[in-house]
Image: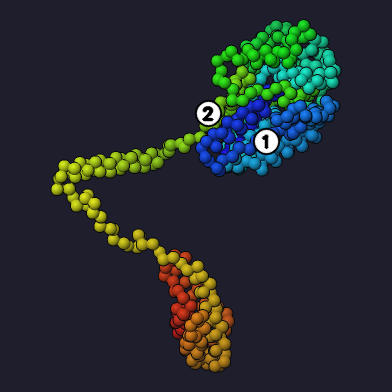
């Protein structure tokens, strides 16, 4: 089963989309009565302290100073630990029978590549679901959360608030008081109200020569693969966030949700979450994460297949995502496979035509129907070596072979030494081989004159005999079975080898 990687900017609706997908896929799996498939939802690390879905009134939130969404993403050490825990959870859950939904920012393309490699190592595929939202929409949703939780007074107004009436920062340090470890990636459109700065001196010269208006037009022409390419609505980029004379963030969100009801979108599968369903970010942390975000690209193999969901859609494209994680069986494309498929189809049509002709002749009372077509069995094919199945090998065939031949070697050596025939004098020796459940088997062997019997030559003859028998055991035929038969065959083998050696 695949891995569904949820990615998006903060407050863009990642958890809402992840719950929608999990709920829809659980219902589809239950409807198909497939007990092997399951859905596993993995929440983000900072969502562990979010209020429970069933009761938000009795929830005791942490103080704004220890907000997990700020403490995790403001310190590189804690953020690295959070990503490691998410990666370990995905590694434990991903398998061929589990649909894993990784609900986290996943804003670093290198981390998404790690998740892609982990899914590939588990023998499954991965897809990316991107919740595309404009930055001003994310800021508005975060402000609505701050107002719902009563945290808007906990943070300083002015330069720490994004898009405030005090205006953006200008001067040498345009990045403001952001944390140093958060400056991992700066995109040309992530700071809506500030002119982008480039490390190249040529671009700086262009800024001074062309002017602000020409630079803005140039940025619009080169704005194909940045976050603005994912903006859905045609809102003026020069628009600002609500000021003191405009409605509050919570009122604007309520108006947006009320106006969206009049559109022609399909009804949502679940109600959008309230502003108090999740904890907010501080304005500084939100601005830092918006700058750090690395959007997925459809040209990267670890970001494909990519499903971009705008905030105006009431639900994700369930059918497209389902087809991506459970693709239909592909038809063969090789010439040999296509030729074999055509031959099978022609043979099936031929059999169908013959059956129809036979039924028609029988119905008309035609007596000229061949006897083989009137229900009589066709003569079976004569069995030969290619069609006869080999006899099943006994499970203890090798054990009986080794123990019997080893016992005979010991008896021959002890009997030859007792009779004085082991030093080259020759003579007749008698051995008694015990047979379990039967009487002992007595055999006589003639030791030629001039043959010295010792342990090494007898073991060499024993290995030669067992190798011959092992070949027959491996093929299921052509080997001696039973302890009595093995003892008699091995004694004859020793007698023949002794006579050939003299």
Image vertical order of residue 377 relative to residue 233, above or below: below
Callout 2: few (<14), some (14-19), or many (20+) C-alpha neighbours within 10 Å? Answer: few
- Measured from the top left, where is residue 65 in percent x and y? 85, 27
Q: Taking 6 as reference, is 377 left or right?
A: left
- Measured from the top left, where is residue 390 in percent x and y? 40, 64
Quadrant for residue 338, please give it. Answer: top left
Callout 1: few (<14), some (14-19), or many (20+) C-alpha neighbours within 10 Å? Answer: some
- Measured from the top left, where is residue 55 in percent x and y? 73, 29
Question: Which quarter shows the N terminus?
Answer: top right
Distance Cα–Cα, label 2 vs label 1: 22 Å
Numbered tag placed on residue 319 in the rendering: 2
Numbered tag placed on residue 42 in the rendering: 1
* Residue 192 in sight from this viewpoint: no
- Measured from the top left, where is residue 50 in percent x and y? 74, 30
Q: Nearest the camera: 266 or 128?
A: 266
* Residue 256 in sight from this viewpoint: yes
Residue depicted at 40% across the width and 41% down the height: 337
- Say which element carries label 2: helix
Residue depicted at 68% across the width and 24% down the height: 273
Q: Nearest the camera: 468 or 50?
A: 50
């Amino acid at each position: 089963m695949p891995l569904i990687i949820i990615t998006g900017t903060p407050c863009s609706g990642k958890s809402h989309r992840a719950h929608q997908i999990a709920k829809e896929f659980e219902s589809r799996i239950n409807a198909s009565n497939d007990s092997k498939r399951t859905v596993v939802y993995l929440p983000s690390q900072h969502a562990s302290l979010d209020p429970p879905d069933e009761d938000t009134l009795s929830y005791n939130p942490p103080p704004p100073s220890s907000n997990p969404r700020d403490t995790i993403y403001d310190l590189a050490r804690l953020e690295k630990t959070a990503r490691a825990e998410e990666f370990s959870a995905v590694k434990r859950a991903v398998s061929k029978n589990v649909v894993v939904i990784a609900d986290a920012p996943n804003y670093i393309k290198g981390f998404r590549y790690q998740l892609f490699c982990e899914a590939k190592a588990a023998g499954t595929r991965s897809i990316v679901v991107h919740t595309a939202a404009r930055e001003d929409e994310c800021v508005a949703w975060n402000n609505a959360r701050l107002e719902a939780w009563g945290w808007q007074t906990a943070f300083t107004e002015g330069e720490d608030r994004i898009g405030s009436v005090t205006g953006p920062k200008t001067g040498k340090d345009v990045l403001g008081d952001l944390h140093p470890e958060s400056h991992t990636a700066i995109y040309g459109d992530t700071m809506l109200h500030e002119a982008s700065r480039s490390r190249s001196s040529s671009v700086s010269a262009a800024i001074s020569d062309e002017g602000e208006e020409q630079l803005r037009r140039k940025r619009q022409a080169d704005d194909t693969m940045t976050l603005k390419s994912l903006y859905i609505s045609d809102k003026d980029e020069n628009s600002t966030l609500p000021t003191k004379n405009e409605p509050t963030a919570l009122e604007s969100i309520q108006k947006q949700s009320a106006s969206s009801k009049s559109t022609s979108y399909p009804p949502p599968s679940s109600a959008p979450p309230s502003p108090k369903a999740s904890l907010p970010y501080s304005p500084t942390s939100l601005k830092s994460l918006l700058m750090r975000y690395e959007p997925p690209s459809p040209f990267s193999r670890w970001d494909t297949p990519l499903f971009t969901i705008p905030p105006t859609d009431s639900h994700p494209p369930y059918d497209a995502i389902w087809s991506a994680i459970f693709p239909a069986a592909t038809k063969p494309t090789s010439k040999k496979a296509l030729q074999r498929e055509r031959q099978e189809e022609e043979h099936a049509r031929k059999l169908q035509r013959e059956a129809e002709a036979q039924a028609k002749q029988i119905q008309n009372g035609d007596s000229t129907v061949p006897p083989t077509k009137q229900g009589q069995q066709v003569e079976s094919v004569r069995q030969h070596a290619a069609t006869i199945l080999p006899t099943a090998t006994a499970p203890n065939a090798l054990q009986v072979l080794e123990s019997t031949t080893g016992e005979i070697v010991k008896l021959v050596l002890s009997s030859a030494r007792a009779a004085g025939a082991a030093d080259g004098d020759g003579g007749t020796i008698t051995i008694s081989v015990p047979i379990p459940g039967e009487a002992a088997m007595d055999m006589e062997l003639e030791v030629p004159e001039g043959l010295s019997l010792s342990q090494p030559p007898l073991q060499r003859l024993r290995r030669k005999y067992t190798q011959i028998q092992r070949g027959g055991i491996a093929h299921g035929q052509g080997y001696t079975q039973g302890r009595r038969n093995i003892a008699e065959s091995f004694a004859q083998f020793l007698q023949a080898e002794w006579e050939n050696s003299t």
